[in-house]
Image: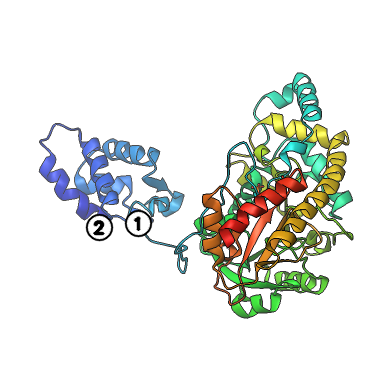
Amino acid sequence: MNRTFLATQPLLAANREQDAPIYLQLYRRYRQAIAAGELRPGDRVPSVRSLASELNLARGTVEMAYQMLATEGYLVARGAAGTVVSPRLANLAGPRRAKGTALPVREPPCPPIAAGRALPFQLGLPALDAFPRKTWARVAGRKLRALEMTAMGYLDPAGYEPLRRAVAAYLGISRGIACAHEQVFITAGYRGALELAHRALLQPGDLGWYEDPGYMLARQFLERAGLRLTPVPVDEEGLNVDIGQRRAADARFAVVTPTHQSPMGMAMSLPRRLELLEWANHRRAWIIEDDYDSEFRYHGRPLPALKSLDRNERVLYTGTFSKVLLPGLRLAYLVVPASHIERFTDVANHLPGPGSIQPQATVADFMEHGHFARHLRNMRVLYAARRGYLADALAQTLGELLHVQLQAGGMHVLARLKTRQNDKALASSANAIGLAVQALGDWRMRKSSTPGGLLMGYANFATAEEAAASVRRLRDVLK
Ligand SMILES: Cc1ncc(COP(=O)(O)O)c(C=O)c1O
């Protein structure tokens, strides 16, 4: 016999004479039963017809109660399969986690941020003082005045078309990626790209490889989305594909930073790239390539993107405007396989999308008119100089305690501790006095026996003196 009926009948029998109309009593009884866990997400409820006949009620009465419950999200109709308690109420009825999903025991602290200004050593922040404000304002103003009527209504959730075209053209030239603009989805930052990718291709509980150490914020984001992550160590050639295969050959996806591993800084070697593609192709797994700062390289040419080697459409490529323009824009992009455009379009239609037209339209114009390429050229020269300010200051003031091995690119350095001091404790003491260094240990998923390190951004050290003064403050903490 159906448990819903058992739960409902006594209450209705007892309450017949009460003032509340029967449909409302029925509605309340269901709500109560769901909240108390008597009815679990996914449980089927009796059809209108059978409940009406069991309780000796008019069908319209039961229908009205069911309709209210459906409108409020308690019940969902499943066509021929009947009506069930919404599976999305899992949290209401107590924890029932996807099999094998482990929530992180303790998440590392979020990196320090000072709204509207750069803290010394702040990671991932481009040079705010060198942003071409005047050009930007001119382009933005012109674009705003000339905005086409079509762009003034609701926007395509996949992004503003001229920007999608500009990104596709840019990737073709600078990253060796041949893609049509329909494959480019503009998103609200990198996490917007991850959101779109996992909703389109993955299920909660799916297992993925994650670089260890790896980008902390994306890891937390994916874990909170219900995905399970297997740490795969990185060495001087990038992600160790062999270890990934030994730990979780059947993973559904891998998230990698092949151009400039985050945070260690090495590039993934070509043999490793080929191994990774081979694994993904063989297992029908997805690779999410996070190409967050490939534009900044100070010697040699960057390897083309992993995506440019992808013959079997296993790679989802993401890039961001946070490093090359401003993080405040909250604009990134995801390049999806041509065969999956429809699937991604459908998912994007049900997500909030990349936001306002104005920044998208301005970035598109900025790219089309050559300002973007000029800005990148200027920033490459500037960052190479600012990296030198920091490296010199560290060598002079903290050479006994820290070892810096400069990588070919990026916007931060990793300073390895020469002592066995705890990098997390050091970073948190530095944070307490407004220095935004981060501990390598916080980016790790597993404990490591190798010495710790401190991650330091340099893009906002405008002069050698500024870098030196901040390094002296850091010395006081470290000693
Ligand atoms: C490794 C990595 N990937 C991606 C991003 C870009 O994130 P977003 O587009 O959300 O600013 C960052 C920013 O710091 C990063 O460090």
Which residue is at 74% across, 42% downward? 127
| Left or right, residue 123 beside residue 90 | right
Image quarter for residue 370?
top right
Q: Which amino acid does label 1 sit on?
A: Asp
Tally of numbered tags: 2
Across and down, in percent, residue 166 comes to 82, 40
The residue pinned by badge 1 equals: 43
The amino acid at mark 2 is Arg
The colour scheme of the drawn protein is rainbow
Q: Where is residue 147 in the image (x, y as percent from the top left)?
A: 76, 22
Q: Which mark is residue 212?
A: none
Residue 355 located left or right of residue 71? right
Rendered view: 473 above or below 447: above
Disc 2, SS: helix
Q: State the residue position of label 2.
A: 3
Identify which residue, 376 or 83, lies in the foreground. Answer: 376
